[in-house]
Image (cartoon, rainbow, N blue to C red):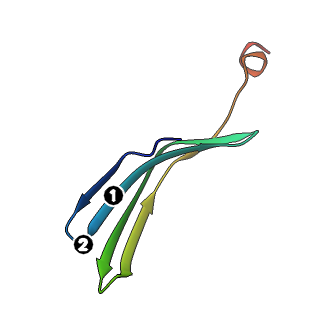
């Protein structure tokens, strides 16, 4: 999977998606702040939703 990322100085922003058999995330975002080569702060935001098949939607 190609994960868009943006770097600016000591900041890193990652946008991501994930799926398994029954759940998915389509709007994942992580941010990291680096100090002296170590992560000093991190945030994460995502919405976990049910993953539906075409059969589920027509039933």
Q: Residue at x 74, y 12 (%)?
A: 58
Question: Looking at the rendered structure, which numbered label has been put on residue 13?
Answer: 1
Question: Looking at the rendered structure, which numbered label has been put on residue 4?
Answer: none
Q: In screen coordinates, is 18 left or right of 5?
A: right
- Where is residue 7 drawn, in percent x and y? 26, 59
When asked about the image quadrant of residue 50, the answer is top right
Q: CA distance from mark 2 to mark 1?
A: 10 Å
Q: Is residue 39 above or below residue 29?
A: below
- Where is residue 55 drawn, in percent x and y? 78, 16
Q: Is residue 51 above or below residue 35?
A: above
Q: Residue at x 72, y 17 (%)?
A: 54
Q: Residue at x 76, y 39 (%)?
A: 21
Q: Number of labelled discs?
A: 2
Tell me the crowding category of disc 2: few under 14, some 14 to 19, or many 20 or more residues within 10 angstroms, Cα based. Answer: some
Residue labelled with disc 2: 10
Indicate the quadrant containing the N terminus: top left, top right, bottom left or bottom right: top right
Closest to the observer, 51 or 7: 7
Tell me the crowding category of disc 1: few under 14, some 14 to 19, or many 20 or more residues within 10 angstroms, Cα based. Answer: some
Q: Residue at x 74, y 39 (%)?
A: 22
């Amino acid at each position: 999977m190609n994960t868009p990322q943006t770097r600016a100085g000591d900041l890193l922003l990652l946008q991501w998606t994930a799926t398994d058999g029954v759940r998915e995330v389509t709007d994942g975002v992580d941010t990291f702040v680096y100090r002296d080569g170590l992560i000093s702060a991190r945030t994460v935001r995502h919405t976990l939703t049910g993953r539906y098949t075409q059969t589920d939607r027509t039933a």
